[in-house]
Image: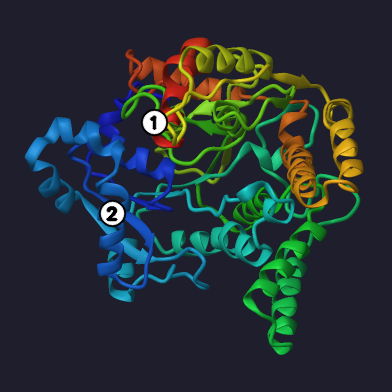
Amino acid sequence: MELFCINQFLEGKTIFISGATGYLAKILTEKILRLQPHVKRLYLLIRAPNSNSAKERFNNEVLSNYYMISSKEKLGPDLHGFIEEKVFPVAGDIACDGDSLGINSELKDEMCREIDIIVNSAATTRFDERYRILRAFCKYDTAIRINTLGAVNVVKFSKQCTKLKMLLHVSTACVCSEREGLILEKPLNYGETLNGSSRLDIDVEKKLVEETLKDLQGRNATEKEVTLAMRILGIERLHGWPNTYTFTKAMGGMLLGHLKEDLQLIILRPTIILSTYKEPFPGWIEGYRGVDTFIVGYGKGKQNVAQVCISYVIPADMVVNSVIAAMVTHRVPSSHTAVYHISSSRRNQLKLGDVVQFVVDYFKKNPWIDERGKPIKVKKFHLLDSTASLHKYIAIRYMPILNILKLANLILFQYLQAVSTTLERSINRAIRLAELHKPYALFKGIFDDTNAEILRMATREINADDTFNFDPRTIQWENYLKEIHIPGLVKYIF
């Protein structure tokens, strides 16, 4: 990488971002606008039926959000005029079949003449809704339509953009999960599986979904029955991946590489994303994932058990910094596919044992105040090194009580039946939660980040300050968790 100012590169560029109402896309949009006001235009793809609805979603879900505070402080009353000039919400959907992404034809033609860079960050990610095992899996048809076929539609659109320098696809490091040892930064081969037991045919997966939906419609299945059938189908078709989210994201990545031809493709694979480290301000977060599930549960007095793991996490703004750094690095068109793991896994590991201690310390000092105004007294935390140890813990701690309650039901049936049922549900919930997070909690792999380190070195050369820092070695985990991340969860999530 030649010495080249990142801000200078962004000047005059037209950038198209899909998934624009998502967490990462919001931070990326804000940072570009704040640091390079002379960017030509940002086209933001927003799932909406028309342009007015797209603008409304942009105003309600993006412009009015917390994260815009930095830009508001910098631009003041001129912010809305500046946004009106630079940002163009586009009604569309990557799940729309074909090469238009559902965009109005006249606008699409204009975009294809102007776009320099495409960032595809659209995805459906809610694979842990309500912690129920079936709900741990997105509807298979929805996940394939967005995460897999959506990637195909983005490639088709990209090939029509005459000025396009690169397609940057935000994936997830979890597409390589369930592996052990050092996991290299390389593309997934088309048709490969994680369990090695069969060859993956993506056309077969698509056809199977279509035929199953057609059969359900022919039987006049209810919406609830269709949802259940699609989740079950997803469970049956995983080929070694732990859930439909990672499976369909993996298939999307395969198809990108398979269909891109001479397009320059950059694939970023961040690990589990936490709250912002510094920008637009420390601790901002939307939704929670991974280790946050245990932090929230523990702080609210509902969870005091966790499985031992290396928490392969990274703050959100570091992922965004890596996106911009990759744009600059690959500004010269090439047919090469570059893969980057954005992770703390290899160079600054965060062990869950440390997380637990930091969390316990925080909530002992700063207890959560419940809806009745009373502080939650946190319990002793139990770390478990396997699913078997979780079952042993439950057997020792809860099963004797449950058995006594069941026996007492013979005498005090109505009251104790309700108590024992509640306890049994708690036990089942703990087991389901452990099963859901087992692929991540007991993950043994280390994500290689050699390519990402080269990217970091080049970025440091051209920007001496930490404006685009994404080096995990600069994170002081105890300070970050106690002073930034957990307070952020309490403020924006609790």
Q: Position of residue 480 (x, y in %)?
A: 47, 16
Residue 102 against residue 196 in the figure, above or below: below
Using the image, tell me which numbered label, if any, was put on residue 427: none
Q: Left or right: where does residue 234 sit relative to residue 320?
A: right
Q: Residue at x 76, y 37 (%)?
A: 434
Residue 491 disc label: 1
Residue farthest to the front, as pictured? 411
Tag 1: amino acid: Lys
In the image: residue 96, left or right of residue 307: left
- Position in image of residue 458 (x %, y %): 44, 20
Q: Nearer the viewer, residue 407 or 67?
A: 407
Above or below 438: residue 261:
below
- The single residue placed furthest to the left in the displayed view is 77
- Check disc 1 and report its element: helix, strand or loop: helix
Q: Position of residue 134 (x, y in %)?
A: 73, 56
For label 2, count other residues whose C-alpha is less than 10 Å away and answer few (under 14), some (14-19) or many (20+): few
Rendering quarter of residue 111: bottom left
Of circles 1 and 2, the one toward us is: 1
In three-dimensional space, the C-alpha distance between marks 1 and 2, rounded to whole angstroms, equals 20 Å
Q: Kindly identify the residue that appears in the image at 71 percent across and 67 percent down.
A: 228
Picture disc at residue 60: 2
113 and 22: which is toward the camera: 22
Q: Residue at x 65, y 72 (%)?
A: 224
Q: Is residue 349 visible?
A: no
Q: Residue at x 47, y 32 (%)?
A: 370
Element assignment for label 2: helix
Q: Is residue 419 visible?
A: yes
Q: Amino acid at mark 2?
A: Asn
